[in-house]
Image (cartoon, rainbow, N blue to C red):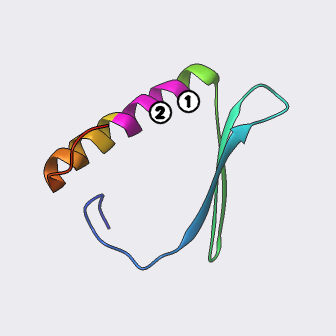
Amino acid sequence: MGINSESDVAANLQIGPTSMGMVRIYIEGDGVDLPLDFDPDEAEEIADEIRAAAARARTMSGKKDR
C-alpha cells in the first residue's frame, strides 16, 4: 500500500503534549496501538509538512487555499 492507495481501514488519531515535554501522535485502530513521540521541533516540522501537503492537495482538487 502506498501514499496514493485508497483503504477502508479506520483509525483514531490523537495529538497532544506528554508530561515529558514531547508531542505524541497516537494512532489506534483495529489491531493497532501506536504511540509516536516527537520533540517539539520535530513536531513543528511534521506540522509544516502536513500544511504543505494540504496546500498541494487543494491545488490538485481545484479547491482554493485558505
The residue at the point 52 percent across, 25 percent down is: 44
Q: Is residue 3 left or right of residue 27?
A: left
Q: Is residue 20 left or right of residue 27?
A: right
Query: Could you tell me the amino acid type at mark 1?
Result: Ala
Q: Are marks 2 and 1 in contact (CB under 8 Å)?
A: yes
Magenta stretch holds residue 47: yes
Q: Quadrant of the N terminus?
A: bottom left
Q: Is residue 29 above or below residue 53?
A: below
Q: Secondary structure at mark 1?
A: helix
Residue located farthest toward the top when viewing the structure as drawn: 41
The residue at the point 30 percent across, 58 percent down is: 3
Magenta segment boundaries in residue numbering: 43-51
Percent position of residue 42, x then y: 54, 25
In 3D space, how far apart are the residues under numbered discs 2 and 1 (Cα atoms)?
Answer: 6 Å
Determine which residue is flagged by label 2.
47
Q: Secondary structure at mark 2?
A: helix
Q: Is residue 14 above or below residue 6?
A: above
Percent position of residue 46, x then y: 47, 33
Q: Which mark is residue 6?
A: none
Q: Quadrant of the C terminus?
A: top left
Determine which residue is flagged by label 1.
43
Percent position of residue 14, x then y: 66, 52
Magenta stretch holds residue 9: no
The residue at the point 56 percent across, 19 percent down is: 41
Magenta stretch secondary structure, dominant:
helix
The residue at the point 27 percent across, 39 percent down is: 55
